[in-house]
Image: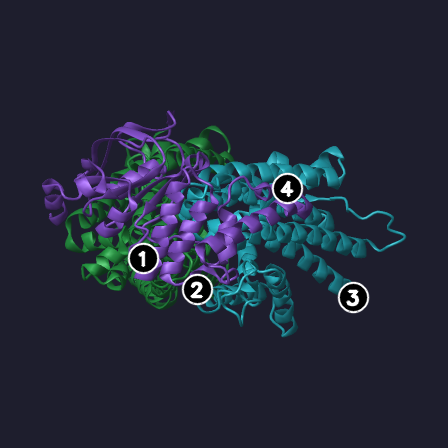
Chain colours: A purple, B cyan, C green
Amino acid sequence: MSCIDLSKSFGGTRALDCVTISFPGPGIVALVGSNGAGKTTLFNILSGFLRPDTGECRIHGRQIAYLAPHEIAALGVARTFQDVRLIRQLSVLENLCLAQPNQVGERIFTALAARGYRSHELRNRHFARMLLEQLRLDGMEDTPAGDLSYGQQKLLSLGCCLAMRPNIMLLDEPLSGVHPTLALEIIELVADIGKSGTLVIFVEHDLEAVASLADEVIVMHHGAMLARGKPSDVLRLPEVMEAYVD
Amino acid sequence: MPYLLHLLILVAIYATLAVSLDLLVGHTGMVSLAHGAFFGIGAYAAALLAVRFGLPIWTGALIGMVGAGTCAFLVGFATARLRDDYFVIATFSLQLVFTNLCENLLSITRGPLGISGIPSLAMFEEIVAPQTQMLVIGLGFLGVVWLIVYRLAKSPFGRVLHAIREDDVLTRALGKDDRYFKSAAFAVSAAAAAGAGAIYASYTSYIDPSAFTITEAILVLSMVIIGGAGRTWGPVIGAAVLVLLPELLRLIGLPDAVASNVRQLLYGVALVGIVMLRPGGVVGWTNVHERVR
Amino acid sequence: MPQLLANAIVTSAIYVLVGLSFSLIYTTSRFFNFAHAGYIVVAPYVAYFLARNLGAGWLLAFVTGAIAGALTAIALDAFIFQLLVGRQSPSTAPLLASLGLFVVIQATIALVFGAASLSFGLGEGSIYEVLGARLTGVQGATIIAAIVGAAMVWLFLQRSTRGKLIRAVGCDRELAIAYGIDPVKVSLMATGVGAAMAGIVGCLSAADIGLTPTAGFQLLLGGVVAMVIGGVGSTPGLLLGAILVAAVEHGAQWWFSSAWDRLILFGILLLFLLFRPAGILGRSSRAASV
């Protein structure tokens, strides 16, 4: 995945200023920066919820800047949101079933005859239950997602991303507001995901977590990239420290 | 007895309208004010094709259903990405346009004079009374529409609709094309309403624009909400209550002209009351949070 | 031809006023309030009652009617809409409640006054000849009211403190609360002003072409379409939209038959919704903010 010369302004504020970044391969990349640095804006553009004013984005060489979010998702991009988004009225299992791609039963004519999608749906549920185990949420299968604790909801939204079987995951503050024990679980999970060949880009403020998890760190400041490199190197640079305090 | 049958037939027809609207309002969360228009498209299509060209009601009904469904799909597609209010405005306009066309295209629809002499769907009238036949047809069609909506609601397709109802941003991020789902739901609901319209036209043998106005659209919407949106039996119960209500009013001696306004007053109040106090409607009176799925 | 133009201008004036009254409230509340069609007709019915049954002068009756309409709207907002907008109810709740309220208002009016069209008997008053067209006094007053109203609303929303409060609450309710603004008070204020304006246009329209309980709907549709086409949130846009809507309506009636005006209008509305939902002069409104 790569972006070239991305810019985005909102009214008078320049959220992104000619940003050029490329993510050549799988692994875990952290995106850090103070509030207003442009991280969420970048995520929104990468996932198709915003259109850049200038510049382009590509996945495997393919232009994605003007695609709709669902089209980008179909290319293998999954994301979470800063405010946890789930379908609270559906159960935990159903959220995981919903997220899976290419469901035959979602086409209206197939949906009318249960026979058409029953086997697919069973396979879906099986995969969803496996994910539940991986997330250590089994036992909460039928609980409405809205009844979960905040940390569990974050875990579930991560699970929904996994259910999409993505190549690229964009995680917006996966650890914020989460109890430390649960945070460790999430960190472990993300580490596993990174090892399995997925590109994970995550936004975080917890620098310790960033240091332990990320292969690479990108620091953003006022809409531009400030520094990039291994966590141990980048996080000690004086400009970065200054920008963070700012 | 014939009067009771008449009421039951009306309940069946309006329940079909309510169930079909519920797919859109209750399951997908999109409020539409165009249902009077789709009801009318089916009725006028069947009536005109039968009276002018001698086509059997079935054919007219089918053509009306396809027409209504296509129209709905296009409008749904155009408005799917916009705010909810824009969809309401679009359906509101569609409804008023339809009424306007009916009243003014005198050469085709005869305006307020209406179309009479619509043939009945009943056959072999010596064997089974036509009214009974109409009841069977009405209930049969209601059954089919109800089954379709129920099936869709329980399927993965319905799961996406429920997701859209709550959060269409997330639904898109999960890779679902919300335009398709919204338009498809709208099309099915419109086609079903048109079918009910054809049955209605065949039953009453005379139609005029006044049965297919915005007032009707609001009435059907009220049936859905008061009965219980998104719940299995909610729309049917809502239809039964609101169709039978004027009869009760008549029983206590209110003159017809007053009765219709009192009925409106009552269901207007009920609508506001349900929305504010018991969003689950009559069916969901006790468990306020539970839903079909 | 000049008469056609004059009629179109009068109609566009009516739609401007309806659109202004609606957008004042919509700017804060952000939902389609059907009861607005009710606000439009309450005033003229009250005025009719006062003038015909109590012998009040027309001007006094209109003003009292508009105030009555505004008070009704404020009461409904306070006891119903604010409760629905604030809490965690689905976004369709205020819309559905507004539909119920409109039905209640309409039914009540029909019960009290009957459904027949009421005439105010003011159309035959003074008639002016302007550039080859004939305008009644009421029609002239409508045009002036529209121009004055548009200017005042624009100034109010853009320049005055209260106007900015209204826009702030509409833009981001939670942020406004964080700044110490009371969204309920702001909403009530916007509702009062908007409903009073709706009442005035209702009276003017009733004086011109008569009054029925359902007149509110047609007027509301015209005003809202004008607002959407012209651009939500833009007063000059509303003026453009209203002129366009009126032009299409009268033009279609002139060249084709009156069956086609709504259809053409709806076609234009759909084209705008498809290709330019922001309207001619509106700011681009995102369907979802992430």
The C terminus of chain B lies in which quarter of the figure? Answer: bottom right
Where does the image place residue B69, in percent across and percent down from the top left? 59, 39
Classify residue A26 by image quadrant: top left
Q: Is mark 3 on a helix, strand or loop?
A: loop
**Which quadrant: the N terminus of chain B?**
bottom right
Residues beneath discs 2 and 1 located on the same chain:
no
Q: Which three-letter amino acid code belongs to the residue tagged 3?
A: Met
Tags 3 and 4 on a common chain: no
**Label 4 secondary element:** helix
Q: To which residue does mark 4 refer?
A: A110
Q: Which residue lies furthest to the bottom in this view?
A: B252
What chain letter is assigned to the residue under label 2? A
**Which residue does the numbered mark 2 point to in the structure image?**
A147
Label number found at residue C170: none
Q: Distance between the residues labelled 1 and 3?
A: 50 Å
Q: Residue C195 carries which label?
A: 1
Of A25 and C116, which appears nearest the observer?
Answer: A25
- What residue is drawn where x is 47% and y is 68%? B273
To the question of a shared chain for discs 3 and 2, the answer is no
Q: Which of marks 4 and 1 is in front?
A: 4
Query: Disc 4 and disc 1: Cα gap in Å?
Result: 50 Å
- What's the amino acid at mark 4? Thr
Return the disc, 4 or 2, that comes first in the chain's sequence: 4
Label 1: state its secondary structure. helix
Spatial separation of the CA atoms under disc 2 and disc 1? 41 Å
